[in-house]
C-alpha cells in the first residue's frame, strides 16, 4: 500500500529530472552549438572571399551564415561584415555598381535599434554620397545618423560622426548645432571650439 502512495511522488521526481535534462540539452543546443555553427559558417565565408568572382557568389557565400538559424550571432556577423563592406566601398577604384549591391546586401541585416549598426549604415551611405553625389544617399545617411542620435544622444561616435557628416555637406547651422551639443559634454574639446568659431 505504501508503494502505491509513493508512486505519484516517484513519477513527479522522474518527470522533473527528465525536464531538467531536456532543458539542459536545449540550452546547450541553442546557447552554444547553434551559435558555434553559425560563427564557423561566417569564418568559412570570410576565408572564401578571395575566391569570389561575382556578386551572386558573394551573396551565396555569406547567406550560408546569415540564413543559418541561431538565437545568437546575427548582430555580430552583421557588425563584422558591414565593417568589411565599409572598407571595400571606401577603396578609391571601387565600382559604384558593386558598392551599391554590397550596401544593399548588408542593409537588411543591420539592426535598427543598434547604435553601431546605425552608424555604420550612415557611414556607408555617406561614402556613397561623397563619391557619387546622389542626394538620396545623403538622405539615407542622415536618416541613419538621426536614428543613432535618437538612441544614443550622448555617445561620442554618434556626435562626432554627425559633425563630420555635416561638415562634409557644408551645412553650417547643423555643424554649429552638433558642435554645441558636443561642447555641453566635452567643453575642453579645442577642435570643436575652433569649428564653432569659424
Image (tube, rainbow, N blue to C red):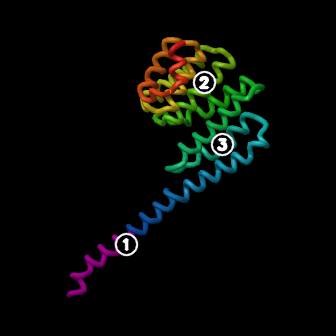
Q: Classify residue 170 as left or right of residue 45.
A: left
Near-viewer residue (191 or 9): 191
Q: How far apart are marks 1 and 3 (CA)?
A: 41 Å
Q: Report the predominant secondary structure element of the magenta stretch.
A: helix
Label 2 Cα crowd, 10 Å radius (few <14 / some 14-19 / many 20+): many
Q: Distance between the residues labelled 2 and 1?
A: 54 Å
Question: Which of the image's four quarters has the N terminus?
Answer: bottom left
Q: Which of marks 3 and 2 is in front?
A: 2
| Secondary element at image label 1 | helix
> Disc 1 designates what residue?
17
| Residue 122 locus on image (x, y percent) | 56, 27
User: Which segment did they paint magenta?
Assistant: 1-18
Q: Which mark is residue 194?
A: none
| Secondary element at image label 3 | helix
> Disc 3 designates what residue?
62
Residue 13 among those drawn in magenta: yes
Q: How far apart are marks 3 and 2 (CA)?
A: 21 Å
Q: Classify residue 142 as left or right of residue 153.
A: right
Residue at the image point whose x is 64% and y is 46% from the top: 64
Q: Residue 125 carries which label?
A: 2
| Residue 58 locus on image (x, y percent) | 71, 38
Residue 124 among those drawn in magenta: no
Closer to the chain start, of discs 1 and 3, is 1
| Residue 48 locus on image (x, y percent) | 74, 46
| Secondary element at image label 2 | helix
Residue at the image point whose x is 69% and y is 19% from the top: 131
Place residue 67 in its image quadrant: top right
Question: Which of the image's four quarters has the C terminus?
Answer: top right
Closer to the chain start, of discs 2 and 1, is 1
Place residue 66 in its image quadrant: top right
Amino acid at each position: 500500500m505504501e508503494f502505491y502512495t509513493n508512486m505519484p511522488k516517484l513519477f513527479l521526481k522522474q518527470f522533473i529530472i527528465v525536464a531538467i535534462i531536456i532543458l539542459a540539452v536545449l540550452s546547450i543546443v541553442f546557447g552554444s552549438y547553434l551559435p558555434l555553427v553559425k560563427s564557423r559558417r561566417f569564418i568559412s565565408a570570410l576565408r572564401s572571399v578571395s575566391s569570389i568572382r561575382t556578386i551572386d557568389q558573394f551573396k551565396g557565400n555569406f547567406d550560408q551564415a546569415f540564413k543559418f538559424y541561431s538565437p545568437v550571432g546575427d548582430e555580430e556577423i552583421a557588425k563584422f561584415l558591414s565593417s568589411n563592406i565599409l572598407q571595400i566601398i571606401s577603396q578609391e577604384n571601387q565600382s559604384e555598381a558593386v558598392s551599391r549591391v554590397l550596401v544593399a546586401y548588408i542593409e537588411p541585416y543591420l539592426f535598427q535599434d543598434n547604435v553601431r549598426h546605425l552608424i555604420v549604415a550612415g557611414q556607408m551611405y555617406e561614402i556613397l554620397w561623397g563619391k557619387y553625389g546622389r542626394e538620396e544617399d545623403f538622405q539615407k545617411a542622415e536618416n541613419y545618423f538621426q536614428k543613432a542620435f535618437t538612441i544614443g544622444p550622448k555617445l561620442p561616435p554618434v556626435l562626432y560622426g554627425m559633425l563630420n557628416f555635416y561638415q562634409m555637406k557644408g551645412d553650417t547651422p547643423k555643424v554649429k548645432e552638433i558642435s554645441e551639443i558636443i561642447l555641453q559634454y566635452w567643453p575642453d574639446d579645442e577642435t570643436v571650439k575652433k569649428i564653432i568659431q569659424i
